[in-house]
Amino acid sequence: GAVVSQHPSWVICKSGTSVKIECRSLDFQATTMFWYRQFPKQSLMLMATSNEGSKATYEQGVEKDKFLINHASLTLSTLTVTSAHPEDSSFYICSANNEQFFGPGTRLTVL
Amino acid sequence: DQQVKQNSPSLSVQEGRISILNCDYTNSMFDYFLWYKKYPAEGPTFLISISSIKDKNEDGRFTVFLNKSAKHLSLHIVPSQPGDSAVYFCAASVSSGGSNYKLTFGKGTLLTVNP
């Protein structure tokens, strides 16, 4: 079946630094990728929809200047958390094209 | 405003018995519903889905029932196995004619199947 990978699987960074998370579709082309965030014991919340070759669409309340999304190819979307703060610590998950295929997630911890 | 609600944070079931996971939604525009299974620190794994034109969909041990008038759906697992122990998320979307759906998730229900 289709596989979506994420890298890194976990990252710890200092407050104020930027962190890039990659989402790749391994055996299919993904014109659209979705980025979700999950806080402990909470549901997955959609942050943005990433479209290949165009600007991402952000959900209400998500700062586009803080969470930069780039979808430069049909197999790769990146989410960059800029000037990360402890409140950005969360589990970030992407899904590609078909809503059935999610990546394994990236655990971000900001100290 | 929680549009998809899973009111039971946890459920404990004996192996071999039926597990029934419930989900309610408030947005009447939702017309496609999905269930996912998730382990800690992993992404969700798709289990089964149902379109609003149906009221039941079955796949092996998993059956999803949809009651549109009540805005309620449920996932039945029969027979339950210890390996089914995980967090189960209900999700809903408004189909846009394409295949790229934005999903709204519930908070999940932790299912524990005891041997």
Image (spheres, coloured by chain):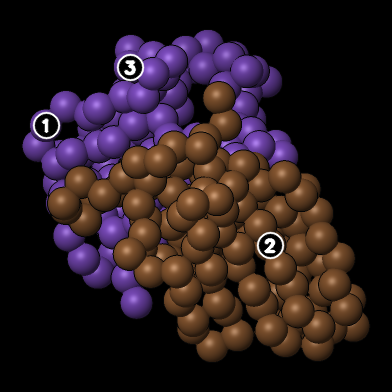
Chain colours: A purple, B brown
Residue B21's disc number: 2
Where residue A44 sits in the image (x, y, percent)?
A: 54, 41
Q: Which of the 4 image quadrants contains residue A89?
A: top right
User: For the residue carrying disc 1, how many other residues have a C-alpha within 10 Å: few (<14), some (14-19), or many (20+)?
Assistant: few
Residue at the spot 61% in from the left edge and 67% down from the top edge: B75
According to the image, label 3 marks what residue? A64
**Looking at the figure, which quarter contains the C terminus of chain B?**
bottom right
Looking at the rendered structure, the kind of residue marked 1 is Ser
Q: Image check: A14 left or right of B30?
A: right
Looking at the rendered structure, the kind of residue marked 2 is Leu
> Does residue A67 appear in this view?
yes
Count all numbered tags in the image, as a single digit.
3
According to the image, label 1 marks what residue? A54
Q: Nearer the viewer, mark 2 or mark 1?
A: 2
Same chain for mark 2 and mark 1? The answer is: no
Where residue A50 sits in the image (x, y, percent)?
A: 25, 37
* Callout 2 secondary element: strand
User: For the residue carrying disc 3, how many other residues have a C-alpha within 10 Å: few (<14), some (14-19), or many (20+)?
Assistant: some
- The earlier-in-sequence mark between 3 and 1 is 1
Q: Chain of mark 2?
A: B
Looking at the rendered structure, the kind of residue marked 3 is Lys
Q: Label 3 to label 2, Cα distance in Å? A: 36 Å
Residue at the spot 53% in from the left edge and 43% down from the top edge: B25
